[in-house]
């Protein structure tokens, strides 16, 4: 039995512009990056909405798959992937839409067509994904990397075949997703220009040595991931492809985000890491209280030390529930004055510490007191 597929499709607006009445393509292009209908003046908004409604109704009534392929680049790729029979399988789909009114509306029309043929569909409106703002586009690509790392691995581990359908969508997004497909997809598919053939590109047998890259720049990457200040001068030795600067502060580029998402769990599980701020220090006997910890628990310790570093640098404004940093009540705490979560599931443990000489010292890992 073939594996079930998770198919990720990039979506554009060709569904609206193909065979549109005179003047509509220019109107659609003009307002392509507006976030919501209210951002478009009344008269053009009404005309666009009428076109959306008509195209949605056309897709609802259309039973000729050839006609759907002519109207929608996304469906063109998918119908060819299924050998001309959209009902040949019942797969899961994620449609990646721009962060715009027209982008999401178009993706939902495609979703309706797939659902009528028995597929499960999620429309994912990618935050900040728009084609008129390079800075927003970079943020969106970083978010896509994080989503791929967090979501697609789970599907593959569960036995799904991950396919990227890159026939539709904007060329800038297609190019980036093609590169991601080398790492996260089992294959990427396109309809080759000016032909009716489906081009299938299998996953390349390449390995990105993310762990080695991360270890070389670990302190900088950890601070960026923790949303702590990293000045432009501090990343002078980091490859330009991995970081961007915004108002003088370093942030991950999409490729930097990919390296981080691919490697940090393994690096954080291997050993206790030094704090990423001078405001935090490890006490002389803290290491002893970690004896016998599994790699997964050690990762939790390192993650919470990074959260604690942000708490100490940002002040009282940062204290998520997963950290829960607070003063201890009463007496008899072996010199500790504060505590925070180490992990909260199963045998929940806390990190205990105290302030000394302008720093917070981690004393020990121990059971919670409540």
Image (cartoon, rainbow, N blue to C red):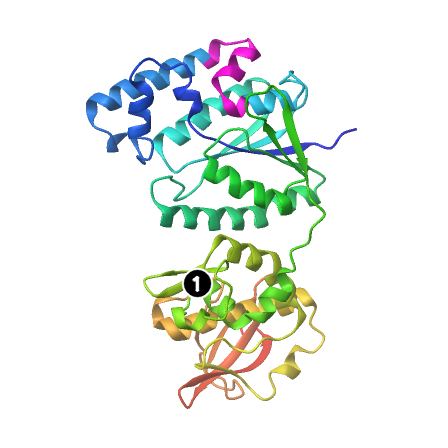
Residue lying furthest front: 194
Q: Position of residue 328 (x, y in %)?
A: 45, 78
Is 34 positioned to the left or the right of 86 in the image? Answer: left
Is the magenta region chiefly helix, strand or loop? Answer: helix
In the image, residue 360 sits, relative to residue 44, either above or below, namely: below
Task: Please tell me which residue lies in front, 145 or 364.
Answer: 145
Which residue is at 41% across, 31% downward?
104
Task: Please tell me which residue lies in front, 88 or 296.
Answer: 88
Is 130 positioned to the left or the right of 213 in the image? Answer: left
Q: Is residue 290 magenta?
A: no
Q: Is residue 211 something that shows in the picture? A: yes
Residue segment shown in magenta: 59-75
Is the residue marked by circle 1 packed among few (<14), some (14-19), or many (20+) residues within 10 Å? few
Q: Tag 1, which secondary structure?
A: loop
Instruction: Return the residue at label 1.
Output: 320
Q: Is residue 346 something that shows in the picture? A: no
Task: Please tell me which residue lies in front, 206 or 107.
Answer: 206
In the image, residue 345 sits, relative to residue 194, either above or below, namely: below
In which quadrant of the rendered view does residue 129 lie? Answer: top left
Q: Position of residue 311 (x, y in %)?
A: 41, 71
Q: Position of residue 96 (x, y in %)?
A: 49, 35
Q: Is residue 65 magenta?
A: yes
Q: Position of residue 276 (x, y in %)?
A: 49, 75
* Count of numbered circles in the view: 1
Q: Which part of the image, by quadrant, shows the N terminus?
A: top right
Task: Please tell me which residue lies in front, 192 or 256.
Answer: 192
Is 226 positioned to the left or the right of 79 in the image? Answer: left
Residue lying furthest right: 1
Which residue is at 60% across, 83% downward?
286
């Amino acid at each position: 039995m073939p594996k079930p597929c998770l198919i990720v499709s990039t979506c554009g607006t060709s569904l609206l512009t193909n065979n549109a009445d005179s003047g509509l393509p220019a109107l659609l292009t003009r307002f392509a990056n507006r976030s919501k209908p209210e951002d478009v003046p009344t008269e053009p908004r009404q005309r666009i909405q009428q076109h959306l409604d008509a195209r949605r109704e056309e897709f609802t009534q259309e039973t000729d798959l050839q006609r759907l392929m002519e109207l929608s680049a996304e469906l063109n790729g998918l119908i060819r992937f299924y050998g001309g029979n959209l009902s040949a399988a019942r797969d899961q789909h994620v449609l990646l839409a721009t962060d715009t009114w027209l982008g999401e509306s178009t993706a939902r029309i495609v979703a309706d067509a797939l659902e009528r043929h028995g597929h499960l569909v999620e429309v994912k409106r990618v935050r900040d994904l728009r084609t008129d703002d390079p800075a927003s586009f970079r943020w969106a690509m970083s978010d896509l990397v994080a989503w791929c790392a967090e979501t697609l691995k789970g599907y593959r581990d569960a036995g799904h075949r991950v396919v990227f359908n890159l026939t539709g969508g904007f060329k800038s997004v297609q190019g980036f997703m093609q590169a991601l497909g080398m790492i996260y997809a089992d294959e990427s598919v396109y309809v080759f220009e000016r032909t009716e053939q489906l081009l299938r590109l299998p996953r390349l047998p390449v390995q990105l040595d993310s762990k080695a890259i991360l270890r070389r720049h670990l302190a900088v990457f950890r601070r960026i991931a923790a949303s702590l200040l990293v000045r432009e001068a501090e990343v002078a030795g980091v490859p330009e492809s991995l970081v961007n600067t915004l108002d003088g502060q370093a942030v991950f580029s999409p490729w930097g985000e990919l390296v981080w998402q691919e490697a940090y769990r393994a690096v954080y599980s291997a050993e206790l890491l030094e704090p990423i701020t001078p405001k935090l220090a490890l006490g002389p006997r803290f290491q002893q209280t970690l004896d016998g910890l599994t790699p997964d628990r050690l990762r939790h310790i390192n993650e919470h030390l990074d959260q604690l570093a942000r708490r100490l640098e940002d002040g009282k404004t940062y204290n998520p529930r997963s950290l829960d940093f607070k003063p201890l009540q009463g007496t008899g705490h072996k010199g500790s004055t504060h505590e925070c979560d180490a992990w909260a599931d199963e045998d929940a443990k806390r990190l205990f510490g105290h302030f000394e000489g302008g720093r917070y010292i981690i004393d020990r890992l121990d059971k919670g007191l409540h």
